[in-house]
Each structure stands twice: as C-alpha cells, then as structure tokens.
Image: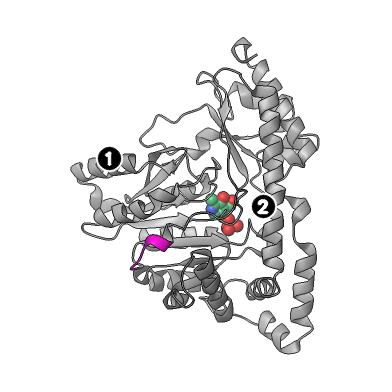
Amino acid sequence: MKCALDNPGLISLAAGFVDPASLPIDPTRRAVDALLSDPARGRKALQYGTTIGDRSLRERLVRRLEQEEDALPGQFAHVIDRTVMTNGSQQLLYLVAEALLDPGDIVLVESPTYFVFMGLIEARGARVIGIETDDGGLSLPSLEETLLQLDEAGDLPRVKLIYTVSEHGNPTGLSLAGDRRAPLVELANRWSKSHQIYVLEDAAYRGLSFTGREPSSVWRHDEDGRCVILARTFSKSFSPGLKTGFGILPEALLDSVLNLKGDHDFGSNNFAQNVLEQVIADGSYDAQVAWLREVYRSKCEVLLGALEEHLGGVEGVSWTTPKGGLYIWLTVPEWLDTGKDGPLFSKALEHEVLYVPGSYAFPDEPGPVPTNHARLCFGVPNEEQLREGARRLAEALAACGERVA
Ligand SMILES: Cc1ncc(COP(=O)(O)O)c(C=O)c1O
C-alpha cells in the first residue's frame, strides 16, 4: 500500500479493497437523511447500542438468511439470540480465536487461505496446518488424512477449528463445492471425539456471485447448530467504511464471545447498524449488491481477458477463473519465486504493477511453502488499469528470463 502511495503511476493488483467508483454514496446519504429526519430514530441511532447488536437488524438478517437458504419463514428464529453484530467479520474471527484457542492448539485451514486470519491464529500461539485444496476448495480426503495423522500423534485434542472461506475465497477466488458442505460438517462432528471441533465459515464474499445464487452455506448443514460458526460482513457487499458484520455462534461459544466483545467495545457502531437496517429495508442494499455483481463480473472478465491476451499459452503460467468475488490466483513456473525478495516482484515494481506474493497465504505446516503464486485483486483498478496491469505483469514475467518470454 505504501508503494502505491509513493508512486501514483503504479497499478496495484495487490490491495484487497472494493471498487471505489461503486461505493454506495447515494443510498447511504438517503438512509442517513431518513434516520436523522425522524428524531426518535435519529436519537436511537446516535445512542449506545447493546453488545450483541441491534435487535431489529438481527431479526431482519435472520429472516433474510431464511430466504437465502431456502428455509421456511421462522425456521431460523431460534438463532436470533445467537446472532452477534460485529465490527466487520474480522472482529468475529478475532473473538472466536481468543475465546477458543490456547497456545499449542491447532487450526486447520485451506492451503492457501486468507493470510490475515493465519496471522491472528499465530499471534495466539496456536499452530496453523494447511489442508490441500483443488478447484472445489478444501479437499475432504486430505482433511481426513491430516486428522488421522494428528490423532495418531496424540494431537487430536488440540484441534479446535477448521477454517474455510467458503465463497469466492481470498486469495484464490474459488468456492467450496456445494456437495462438500454437508460432508464437511459431518466430518467435523465425527472427529469431535473429546470435544467439539468447530467449523468457522468465513463467507465474506457471499452474495458477490457472477453466475446466480451460491449453494447453501456450510452453516445451513449444521442442523443442531453446535458445529459451525458463520461469519458474514457488509464490507464487500456494501461498504467497508461501515465496518459492520455479523456472526452466528453455537450456544457453547456465545457467552465467552459476548463477554470478550463487551470488554472490547460493549457493542459495534450503532449508527452504522441503523444505516444498514435502513438500506436493507428500503431495498437499496439489494439493488447495490445486484449492481456490484455486474461491476465485478465485468472487471473479472476484463482481467481474465487481458491475462489470456498477454500470458495465454505461456508454459507453466495459469490462473483461476472465479465465479464471484474480487480475486484471481496466478500460478507461474515453479522456478520463478514470486516472493517480495524474488525476481518477479522487483521486475513488477520496475514495470509499475503490484501483486500479493502467494507465499503469504500458505501456512508453514506441513510445508514446503510454494513460492510460485500471486494474488491479483480486481477491486480497485478500473478496467483500463486492469488491462494495463496484466500487460505490465506479462512484461515483468518476460523480463525474469527467457523461459517465460
Ligand atoms: C476472507 C476475508 N475474511 C474477512 C475479512 C475481513 O473483512 P471485514 O472485517 O471488513 O468484514 C476479509 C477482508 O478482506 C477477507 O478477505
């Protein structure tokens, strides 16, 4: 980010930020006007809220989940009391880690995964172990194999959490296949021998599908509600500046998470929650999401097209084709190190294009960490910059040696 500020000509395919041009200024202004022109609602919005979050917003979110997940009206009413508003989904990830993990505990993650999450797990002194992924996300046979090995080593009691970015994931853009979702819950429950192994479903990019509705969430398959922690956010689908998300927690985790949240902030930004409730109620939230899907579908197509134009057919170079979200995952030949101190990164800087080195997204265990990937985000650059960014990246690759020329 600092590089981007120092050099305004640089095209950043690195920043995982949303498209600036489509931020919802008008709907937000109308919502704020509506709230503040009604003194009773204005006062409510400007007052402290509660630690768990605004009741009517939580009810509304649960009703929307019923529709999204093809449930009957009222079918999820019992989870309203386990639905917690948070400062973005990041806060929920943090609170769950703090509530659940002791030093030496183990968290199983997709490899590659959202690197910020790994950082916060490691900060708690816990171990992060990567599980193989393919085009359908987390590989369940690999997950099972890792659990078996941990059990044989006597480490199963330390396994507390399985983390999945289920929809259009960061960094690969790929989703957990619909037919792996119920089996993932079944597997986690089956291996919960001495204690519950939780599945933390981070659905930060849910809703931003280019191709229609996503499959039912992993959470939907947790019928007795004791296994899956669902983390959702409005950062990607509406505005990161409102920094509001929500989580649905199994009963056993609720009190400890709420107590920690109370210590942090005794409640997320109440004004932002009221603004969100207003935009959801007046229909502008859904209109915004529908528009964003088109914006990102088009930007993704442009970047994919430019990669094909400049790198198509180059030996050892490939990339994912996401069906939603903000990211494309690039693979280059194994001999080419994409890391910060490697040749591609410095050539990319010379050519004024930035990416996130893929090695950041892999846990050290089981290793070795692959060094030939890059995360490309099409959130911030406009379409012209995306075309130019791909062209510059191809130049940087070609400059790294004849083998990719
Ligand atoms: C996979 C994933 N989870 C969670 C977050 C946190 O976002 P927020 O706290 O704004 O909801 C991000 C942000 O980029 C993300 O990519």
In the picture, which quadrant includes the N terminus?
A: top right
Indicate whether 287 appears above or below 129.
below
x and y, in percent, of residue 233 in the image: 57, 61
Inspect the image, locate mark 2, and give the three-letter code of the amino acid beneath it. Answer: Arg
Lower sequence index among marks 1 and 2: 1
Dot 2: what SS?
helix
Q: Is residue 142 left or right of residue 51?
A: left
Q: In the picture, which quadrant includes the C terminus?
A: top right
Residue 290 vs residue 110, the one in the foreground: 290
Would residue 101 appear left or right of 235 to someone viewing this image?
left
User: What residue is shown with label 1?
Assistant: 145
Measuring 66% from the left and 84% from the top, which residue is drawn there? 44
| Magenta span: chief secondary structure | loop
* Mark 2: few/some/many CA within 10 Å (<14, 14-19, 20+): many
Look at the image and give the residue range highlighted in magenta: 220-224
Query: Mark 1–mark 2 contact, CB under 8 Å?
Result: no
Q: Residue furthest top?
A: 402
Residue positioned most to the bottom: 40
**Where is mark 2, residue-wise?**
293
Q: Can the viewer see residue 252 in this picture?
A: yes
